[in-house]
Image: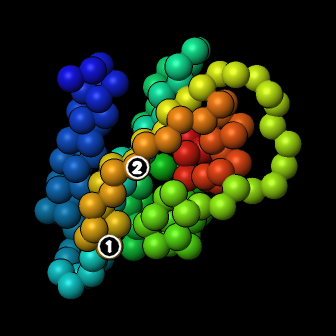
Amino acid sequence: MPFVQRIAALFAVTVLATGALTAATTPRAAHATPDRPTSVLLLTVLPHVHGEPRAAALRCDPAGGTHPEATTACQAVTAVDGDLGAMTPEPGPCTLEYAPVTARALGFWQDQPVSWVKTYGNRCALLRETGSLFAF
């Protein structure tokens, strides 16, 4: 397993374990009911040229996880009903610098599995197409 995938897997296990500990110590009323579908995504960004890989966990309904803009990111995924390939780019300029980055989302949206990967020419192009989803 490549290094980045191992890091992402360890990160996901840590986030899920932390969530399990929180669930065990928090009253049941504060969490999703059993009939509410699961919406949890592990988001990673891997720069090909320079920079460090980044990862964030996104939980929706209620919004949370380690994503710094969880509410906005959940709204963006809700707008395309979990189909990240259907996100529409935001208008605006980007430099023509070639510094490719690969974005990846793994997890579940409304109990449906999500496995999405796309490589962009640079970070600006990534943020234009995905908005706040990968802004961490």
Residue 57 x %, y %: 38, 48
Q: Residue at x 27, y 61 (%)?
A: 113
Residue position marked by numbered label 1 in the rendering: 110
Query: What is the distance, in whole Å, between disc 2 and disc 1 at their CAs?
Result: 15 Å
Q: Residue at x 23, y 33 (%)?
A: 10
Give the structural element (helix, strand or loop) at label 2.
strand
- Closer to the camera, 109 or 74? 109
**Number of marks in the rendered image:** 2
Q: Residue furthest bottom?
A: 35
Residue 26 x %, y %: 22, 67
Relative to 121, say whether 66 is above or below.
below
* Quarter residue 58 falls in: bottom left
Relative to 76, say whether 117 is above or below.
above
Residue 116 x %, y %: 40, 49
Tell me how the rendering is colored: rainbow
Amino acid on which the number 1 mark rests in the picture: Gln
Amino acid on which the number 2 mark rests in the picture: Trp
Residue position marked by numbered label 2 in the rendering: 116
- Closer to the camera, 64 or 133? 133
Mark sitting earlier along the chain (2/1): 1
Viewer-side label of 2, 1: 2
* Quarter residue 4 falls in: top left
- Closer to the camera, 114 or 131? 114
Q: Residue at x 18, y 81 (%)?
A: 34
Q: Quadrant of the N terminus?
A: top left
Instruction: Say if mark 2 contacts mark 1, CB within 8 Å.
Output: no
